[in-house]
């Protein structure tokens, strides 16, 4: 019943740790000193953190001191948004401050805006249509001189749709608003030119690029306001207190260096993804691919199967050894349909029948073919069951 | 691909019974899949870090079930059934109290979730059987080859009372692995297997109410409606008004304590009249009735008018013989050989032929 080898198609949830990083872990692990220590035991770990900062800033083409290490993407998102809110709302007492975000953000952005809204601040949420296109007109209409922060994700975790950050930034800046983008899903998949984009804040996570969990970072453009969520230490120039997770940070730096030639990686993954979508469309009736025509990440596909419960589909695939997800991983375990898909215009039944497939650097053609074979078998069986229960 | 062994979906509550059920199935060579229904947002009622192995706010029981599944190395899923549970169990439970009844929500949970919703899941996951940790047995008649549900080996734990709404056609899909066990031995076995829940206390009362008071729960769920349940306590049968009361939902049939009335003889709740919010208090002799109407009948086997069956009128009732008089397909009248104490509307009357569960209905 089970496949001989499991197939992992959930790389947007997390990625396997690259074998070469695993091999380096003991080397980093023995540098157990506190990076803040003056004595010699602190030198090596401090160097590891510095090296990681350097690697990441080099790949992103920014200054090393514009990188703030955090515990991950969620913290980076919180740090950026809460910093601007605190600065405007509490410090400057600017009660007219307005915020703009999209309605397809990761919960670590969406929930922060709900929180901000609870104090009375105005928050606009721009929608995406079913095709995955961002409504720039709606965005333009919401912008005004009171807008202090725009936070729009770089690429959506559930559909892979890329949002037009390059167009959003100049429009926001012309009203004096700062711009944050959550690029957690884009790192290692898109060529992110922070300086060209001219964003003010950008969030990243290590475990989405074949590194350990427990590290991430926020890019903060020199000169823009930044507070701290965690106070009490001089780490990260007093902006993020707490002894550094040296092992995760060191592996993060190495992982970012390992990204290498994006073009080759994307060509490989996109080819497999497109092949998978073609196979699905050819072999399974009554299904459609979300945002297929939109500009999308090379690795992500979100397929909606009509008349099927995505949760049952996921469990059936799990039982044969194929790992995928429905909606975002964080919302799994709840039968509520993904709010992101609902926001994109899907009805409840469609959203509940969706499957997110995200490929990785090591996904093979054999895996894709095997997966679609199993998928169509299961979809067929589930549909047959449903038909039987109706009749 | 052909399945090598029969596959079974086992409903795991995180308690010791369903945990051992899962373990036994695995030993018996089934391909076992564990599932827990997340039915209620426990953050509303209890949120304790001290008990069990659970983490706060994810429900301790779900976490316990997961750790048992981990120990048994079986696939395990949590299915969120909060909406289904609210609609089919909580709301009817509250409504029933508002109508002056004393409901048993466990039956609805079995009817609409365990043996309906989970049965669908069982088919969707390509399983051959659905198993639970109920103390009940499935037996095949040596004569007709027909399967029926019979009481468990442990008379004291027998839970067939909660299963009377099952449809007879699903019986051959059901497994009750602990039905042949006695509780103390089962617990011993759980310890022998080092199951993480071996020492966990048995759940008592209604799962979603927790340790709290039922009437407090009802008041929290329907704060406006319980305001309209205030009325008076009257002496039965004279009708003399004895006192006012804070709501009919605070009383159950046969209740003696906490009535707030003193009288020469001990008084009991003998009737709750929802239309007028009157709670009738009477002497013990008025608690007994020898006839009862039963509605929403479900039968797992044929019964004949005039037949004498053993009837349980509440879970802990030892059963009493009654003559069945059918009046229509959906209801019947029971005439007990001996008058029964506190026949309570909202509870179930469940019928047995010797050990066989033959059906039941709701007491009017």
Image (tube, coloured by chain):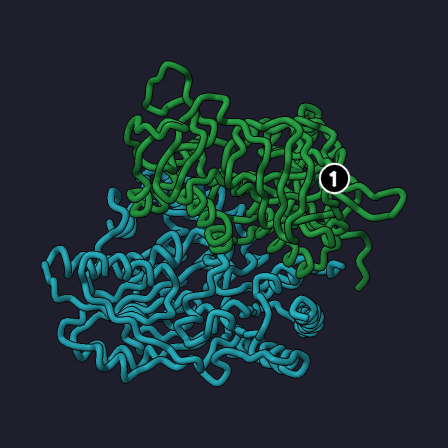
Chain colours: A cyan, B green
Depicted A12 relative to depicted B78: above or below: below
Q: In this view, does A92 lie above or below B144?
A: below
Secondary structure category for the residue under label 1: loop
The outermost residue toward the left is A93
Q: Can residue A371 be seen in this view?
A: no
Which residue lies under the disc numbered 1? B307
The chain to which mark 1 is attached is: B
Q: In which quarter of the image is residue B182?
A: top right
Quadrant of res A187: bottom left
Q: In front: B7, or A38?
A: B7
What is the x, y in percent for residue A325? 55, 63
Task: Measuring from the top left, give residue B296's x and y in whole percent.
Answer: 59, 50
Q: Identify which residue is drawn at 37% across, 48% down.
A: A46
The quarter of the picture where residue B127 lies is bottom right
Q: In which quarter of the image is the N terminus of chain B?
A: bottom right
Residue found 42% across the figure and 76% down from its top: A345
Along the line of sight, the residue nearer the viewer: A160 or A60: A160
| Residue ID at (39%, 74%) | A192
Up-down: is B128 above or below A280? above
* Residue farthest to the right, as pictured: B143
Say left or right for A274 vs A65.
right
Instruction: Give x and y (percent) for residue B247.
Output: 33, 37
From the viewer's side, name the closer residue of A364 and A322: A322
Residue A161 visible from this viewpoint: yes
């Amino acid at each position: 019943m089970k496949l001989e080898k499991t197939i992992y198609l959930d790389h947007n949830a997390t990625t396997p740790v690259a074998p070469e990083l695993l091999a380096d872990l003991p080397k980093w692990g023995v540098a157990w000193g506190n990076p803040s220590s003056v004595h010699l035991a602190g030198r090596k770990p401090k160097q590891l953190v510095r090296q990681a900062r350097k690697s990441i800033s080099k790949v992103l083409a920014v200054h090393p001191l514009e990188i703030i290490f955090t515990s991950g993407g969620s913290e980076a998102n919180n740090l950026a948004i809460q910093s601007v809110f605190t600065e405007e709302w509490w410090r400057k007492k600017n009660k007219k401050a307005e915020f703009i975000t999209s309605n397809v953000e990761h919960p670590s952005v969406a929930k922060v805006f709900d929180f901000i809204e609870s104090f009375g601040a105005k928050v606009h949420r721009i929608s995406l249509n079913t095709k995955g296109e961002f409504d720039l007109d709606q965005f333009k209409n919401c912008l005004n001189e009171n807008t202090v922060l725009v936070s729009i994700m770089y690429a959506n975790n559930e559909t892979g749709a890329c949002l037009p950050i390059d167009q959003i930034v100049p429009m926001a800046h012309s009203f004096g608003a700062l711009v944050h983008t959550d690029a957690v899903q884009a790192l290692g998949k898109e060529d992110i030119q922070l300086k060209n984009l001219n964003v003010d804040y950008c969030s990243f996570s290590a475990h989405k690029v074949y590194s350990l969990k427990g590290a991430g970072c926020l890019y903060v453009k020199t000169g823009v306001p930044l507070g701290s969520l965690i106070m009490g230490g001089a780490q990260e120039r007093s902006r993020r207190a707490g002894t550094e997770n040296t092992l995760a940070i060191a592996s993060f730096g190495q992982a970012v260096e390992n990204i290498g030639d994006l073009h080759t990686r994307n060509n490989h993954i996109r080819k497999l993804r497109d092949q998978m979508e073609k196979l699905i469309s050819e072999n399974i009736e009554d299904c459609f691919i979300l945002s297929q025509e939109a500009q999308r990440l090379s690795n992500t596909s979100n397929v909606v199967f009509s008349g099927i419960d995505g949760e049952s589909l996921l469990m059936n695939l799990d039982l044969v050894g194929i790992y995928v997800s429905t909606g975002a991983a964080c919302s799994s375990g709840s039968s509520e349909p993904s709010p992101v898909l609902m926001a994109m215009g899907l009805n409840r039944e469609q959203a509940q029948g969706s499957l997110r497939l995200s490929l990785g650097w090591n996904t093979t053609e054999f895996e894709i073919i095997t997966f679609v074979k199993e998928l169509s078998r299961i979809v067929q069986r589930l549909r047959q069951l449903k038909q039987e229960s109706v009749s | 691909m052909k399945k090598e062994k029969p596959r079974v979906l086992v409903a795991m509550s995180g308690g010791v019974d369903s945990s051992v059920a899962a373990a036994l199935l695995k030993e018996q060579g089934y391909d076992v899949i564990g599932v827990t229904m997340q039915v209620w947002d426990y953050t509303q009622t209890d949120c304790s870090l001290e008990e069990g192995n659970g983490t706060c706010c994810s429900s301790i029981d779900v976490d316990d079930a997961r750790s048992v599944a981990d120990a048994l190395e079986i696939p395990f899923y949590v299915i969120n059934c909060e909406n289904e549970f609210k609609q089919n169990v909580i709301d009817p439970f509250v409504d029933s109290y508002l109508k002056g009844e004393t409901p048993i929500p466990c039956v609805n949970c079995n009817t609409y979730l365990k043996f309906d919703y989970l049965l669908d899941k069982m088919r969707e996951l390509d399983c051959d059987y659905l198993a639970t940790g109920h103390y009940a047995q499935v037996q095949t008649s040596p004569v007709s080859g027909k399967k029926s549900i019979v009481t468990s080996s442990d008379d004291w734990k027998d839970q067939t009372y909660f299963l009377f709404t099952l449809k007879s056609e699903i019986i051959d899909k059901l497994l009750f692995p602990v039905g042949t066990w006695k509780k103390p031995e089962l617990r011993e076995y759980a310890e022998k297997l080092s199951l993480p829940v071996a020492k966990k206390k048995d759940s008592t009362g209604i799962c979603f109410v927790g340790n709290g008071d039922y009437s407090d729960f009802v008041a929290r769920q329907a704060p406006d409606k319980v305001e309209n349940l205030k009325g008076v306590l009257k002496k039965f049968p004279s009708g003399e008004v004895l006192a006012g009361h804070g709501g009919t939902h605070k009383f159950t049939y046969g209740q003696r304590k906490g009535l707030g009335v003193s009288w020469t003889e001990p008084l009991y709740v003998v009737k709750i009249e929802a239309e007028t919010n009157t709670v009738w208090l009477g002497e013990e002799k008025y608690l007994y009735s020898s006839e009862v109407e039963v509605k929403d009948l479900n039968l797992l086997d044929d019964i004949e008018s005039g037949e004498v069956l053993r009837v349980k009128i509440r879970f802990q009732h030892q059963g009493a013989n009654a003559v069945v008089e059918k009046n229509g397909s959906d209801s019947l009248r029971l005439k007990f050989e001996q008058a029964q104490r506190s026949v309570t509307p909202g509870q179930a009357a469940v019928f047995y032929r010797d050990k066989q569960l033959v059906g039941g209905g709701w007491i009017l």
